[in-house]
């Protein structure tokens, strides 16, 4: 019988030595290498594969010892490791050694590619048995584990997924074999209820749009609007309650709507990726278990995204008094755009989790992350191949618009359209990446804190208090930051549209609100935006930096509002120069002088009041009293004179 060659991966040197000594007692087992990290393991496997080209696999078994599977980060990393080994060496079996696990965790590990699992606290004879079984091509799952029946079901499920085409919907259907009967029944009724609620919501939204178009001064219309909005809130609350009864609330419709674009981004990420342990992109292909673990481990994140998505059903009226690019869009397009941003943000967070991006890298990578989110949203919202076509419907009205009056970019676009060639919209919009990043994306506040909170559950600081992930204070702050991020990215998507296609008729008819569709209104709106950026740059932003606060745009029942939150900005304050620095000095001077001036003015006012009331007033009173007494005396003298 030939020896079974083993590769041991464990950061604990004592356990590695003990396992090696134990295997030496058995002539059919040989540990050819024991390493600390996955990087070293890959190097050993690559070297052995090169040296033994005729061998089907470099070793007979990889033994991976894991200690932190009970933690979310440890489970995610282990699932990623299993997927990496399965991708690079599909015929190489993997045995896991670790602590006790829950049934769903065992199912996720098997779905990710592990062929066996043995707790570390078992007798060495059972560990040797597990090694022999898995190395010989079998599977080993402890019979006394409560998850045994679940694992057996998962075995058939994983085999079905591996042998089926890469169709997410088919895989999702095949996974129903591992769901208990009571959960199946509950899911059936919940999904049916969600469909009815969605249909009712669609009807209510249609009624509400009709009410908004109608006369707003009519009492009956106002009352109807109140009733319809109340019904919509009830339906949204009911939908949220029903979605909580499902393991993965509200995900199926979003997944079906984004799989095509997600697949393209995943392939792009695979081209860039190298290795998990090099802190770069890592893909766990066809691993349904890892995806479920990410969702189930982040229930508070699901509630956070669901809450923001529910607010998108409310009015999107801008109540801040500050113009936003999205104000030019009709309400349906606003909701569609922001929903697209939420979907792409979820995809981006999943890519960052699988890529093992470190928290310390966020400050450096955040501009690129926001640009990726912006680009993905543009492609998803407009369509990668959306082209402005000419023909019987001329896109630009040449009788009212002259090329000389258009900006340079719009002039080129109009020339192409009039010349008979169409213009692809997305490449033109993506060309404004630098301007959008400078004006909007790079100025979005606290994005590093938000992503660190979502990915690593780093506590958020709220009013000098550290709030853990999932707490009410952290949820409220994270929701405000997320809403502001969505609104700002949406403005960044619309800005290049206004810069390049502002007065193109097809764009106006498709995207713009009816009140802002004329050329005059569009130009007025663009001028307001231009003045806003100048005013913010010279006045609002320096003042906010000096006052240590950020302005956030948030979603409310009545529309978009603006709030301020405290945040230390000393580093930005030290970097101010020119007029911005002068403004802070003026504010500081005013703060230093104003109280004293007010005190002096108050003192002078008090003195003036005292003089007027106590001195002049009394003097006037004495004079008046003397006059009255004189008049009285003269009257008396006159009376006595007549009597005499």
Image (cartoon, helix red, strand yellow):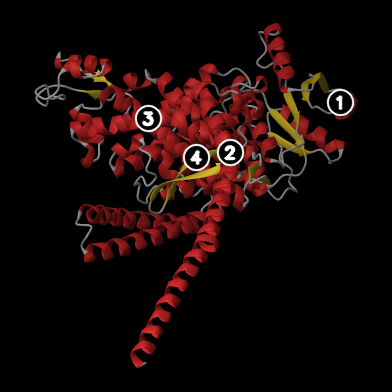
Image height of 643 relative to 196, above or below: below
Q: Residue at x 34, y 34 (%)?
A: 325
- Quarter containing the C terminus: bottom left
Q: Nearer the viewer, residue 460 or 296?
A: 460
Residue with the mark numbered 3:
493
The picture quadrant where one finds residue 398 is: top left
Task: Determine the secondary structure under disc 4.
Answer: strand
Is any atom of residue 371 visible in this view?
Answer: yes
Please tell me whether mark 3 or mark 2 is closer to you in this view. Answer: 2
- Circle on res. 593: 2
> 10 Å neighbourhood of mark 3: few (<14), some, or many (≥20)?
many
266 horizontally vs 466: left or right: left
Whether label 2 touches label 1, CB < 8 Å: no
Quote the CA–CA distance across marks 1 and 3.
53 Å
Element at label 1: helix
**Tag nearer the camera, 4 or 2:** 2
In front: mark 1 or mark 4? 4
Distance from disc 3 to disc 2, alpha carbons, whole Å, reads 44 Å
Spatial separation of the CA atoms under disc 3 and disc 4: 20 Å
Q: Residue at x 40, y 37 (%)?
A: 340
Q: Residue beneath label 1, please? A: 13
**N-term mark: 4 or 2:** 4
């Amino acid at each position: 019988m030939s020896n079974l060659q083993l590769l041991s991966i464990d950061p604990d040197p004592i356990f590695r030595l003990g396992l090696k000594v134990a295997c030496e007692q058995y002539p059919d087992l040989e540990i050819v290498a024991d390493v600390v990290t996955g990087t070293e393991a890959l190097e050993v496997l690559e070297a052995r594969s090169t040296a033994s080209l005729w061998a089907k696999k470099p070793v007979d078994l990889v033994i991976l010892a894991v200690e932190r599977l009970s933690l979310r980060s440890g489970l995610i990393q282990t699932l990623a490791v299993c997927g990496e080994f399965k991708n690079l060496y599909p015929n190489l079996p993997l045995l896991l050694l670790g602590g006790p696990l829950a049934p769903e965790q065992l199912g996720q590990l098997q779905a990710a590619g592990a062929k066996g699992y043995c707790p570390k606290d078992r007798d060495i004879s059972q560990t040797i048995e597990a090694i022999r079984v898995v190395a010989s091509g079998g599977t080993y799952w402890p019979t006394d584990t409560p998850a045994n029946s679940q694992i057996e079901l998962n075995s058939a499920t994983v085999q079905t997924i591996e042998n089926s085409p890469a169709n997410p919907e088919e895989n999702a259907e095949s996974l129903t074999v591992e769901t208990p009967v009571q959960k199946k029944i509950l899911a059936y009724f919940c999904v049916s209820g969600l469909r009815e609620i969605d249909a009712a919501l669609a009807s209510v939204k249609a009624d509400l749009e009709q009410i908004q178009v109608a006369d707003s001064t009519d009492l009956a219309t106002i009352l109807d609007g109140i009733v319809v909005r109340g019904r919509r809130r009830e339906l949204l609350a009911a939908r949220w309650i029903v979605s909580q009864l499902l393991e993965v609330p509200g995900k199926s419709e979003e997944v079906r709507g984004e799989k095509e674009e997600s697949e393209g981004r995943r392939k792009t990420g695979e081209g860039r990726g190298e290795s998990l342990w090099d802190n770069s992109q890592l893909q766990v292909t066809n691993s349904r278990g890892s995806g479920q673990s990410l969702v189930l481990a982040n229930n508070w994140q699901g509630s956070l995204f669901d809450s923001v998505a529910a607010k998108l059903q409310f009015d999107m009226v801008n109540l801040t008094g500050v113009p936003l690019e999205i104000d030019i869009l009709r309400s349906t397009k606003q909701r569609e755009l922001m929903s697209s941003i939420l979907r792409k943000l979820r995809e981006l967070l999943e890519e960052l989790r699988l890529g093992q991006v470190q928290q310390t890298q966020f400050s450096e990578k955040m501009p690129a992350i926001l640009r990726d989110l912006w680009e993905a949203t543009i492609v998803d919202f407009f369509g990668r191949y959306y082209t402005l076509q000419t023909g019987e419907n001329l896109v630009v009205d040449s009788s009212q618009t002259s090329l000389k009056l258009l900006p340079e970019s719009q002039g080129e676009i109009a020339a192409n359209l009039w010349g008979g060639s169409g213009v692809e919209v997305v490449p033109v919009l993506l060309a404004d990446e630098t301007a959008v990043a400078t004006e909007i994306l790079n100025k979005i506040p606290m994005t590093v804190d938000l992503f660190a909170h979502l990915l690593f559950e780093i506590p958020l600081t709220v009013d000098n208090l550290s709030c853990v992930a999932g707490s009410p204070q952290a949820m409220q702050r994270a929701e405000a930051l997320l809403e502001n991020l969505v609104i700002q990215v949406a403005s960044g998507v619309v800005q290049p549209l206004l810069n390049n296609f502002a007065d193109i008729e097809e764009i106006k008819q498709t995207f713009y609100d009816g009140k802002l569709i004329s050329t005059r209104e569009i130009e007025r709106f663009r001028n307001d935006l231009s003045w806003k950026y100048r005013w913010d740059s010279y006045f609002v932003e320096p003042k906010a930096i000096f006052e240590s606060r950020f302005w956030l745009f948030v979603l409310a029942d009545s529309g978009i509002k603006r709030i301020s939150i405290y945040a230390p900005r000393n580093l930005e304050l030290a970097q101010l120069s020119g007029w911005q620095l002068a403004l802070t000095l003026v504010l500081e001077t005013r703060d230093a002088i104003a109280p004293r001036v007010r005190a002096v003015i108050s003192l002078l006012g008090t003195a003036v009041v005292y003089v007027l009331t106590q001195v002049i007033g009394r003097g006037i009173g004495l004079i008046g009293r003397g006059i009255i007494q004189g008049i009285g005396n003269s009257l008396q003298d006159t009376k006595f004179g007549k009597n005499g």
